[in-house]
Amino acid sequence: MKKSTKDHQGAVLYLRVASADQQDQRDGIAEQRAVCTRQAERLGVVVTDEYVDAGASGNNKDRGGLRRLLASVRQRPVRYVIVRDRTRLSRNPADDATIRERIEQDGATIVSAADKRSPR
């Protein structure tokens, strides 16, 4: 059952790089954080938390940051989960669908900062 979105406030960020060596590169954690924070500002919402998986493959859904993100969205109202691009959540299509469905059932909207369209 989908939660009501009327009381949902703020946004959380999910940041991921596949290897620890990527953390400081162009698409590293700091760059993702900056891009996602700018997206939150455009949406007019406050970032309340961030979840990071540094050195975690997008083909593996058993990641600490992702587990914490999913638990948090389930436990408290969150309006948006912001990622730099859609591959940050998962690179496995079946896992991606499962993760997205769970986040949406818990009342949040996933927003890709790379996607120029407005969220639903």
Image: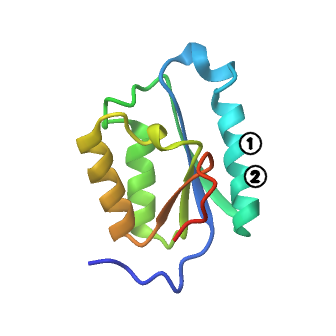
Query: How are the colours assigned in the image?
Result: rainbow
CA gap, disc 1 and disc 2:
6 Å
Give amino acid for label 1: Ala
Q: Residue at x 31, y 31 (%)?
A: 60
Q: Which residue type does callout 2 highlight?
A: Arg
Q: From the viewer's perspective, tell me whether residue 33 is left or right of residue 115.
A: right
Disc 1 target residue: 34
Pointer 2: residues within 10 angstroms few (<14), some, or many (20+)?
few
Are the residues flagged by discs 1 and 2 in contact, CB closer than 8 Å?
yes
Q: Which residue is disc 2 drawn over?
A: 38
Residue 119 appears at what percent x and percent y? 55, 66
Closest to the observer: 30 or 68?
Answer: 30
Q: Quadrant of residue 44?
A: bottom right
- x, y percent for residue 104: 38, 66
- Residue at screen point 64% across, 27% down: 27
Dot 1: few (<14), some (14–19), or many (≥20) neighbours within 10 Å? few
Q: Is residue 93 left or right of residue 17?
A: left
Task: Please state which of residues 36 and 114 is positioned toward the viewer in this rendering.
Answer: 114
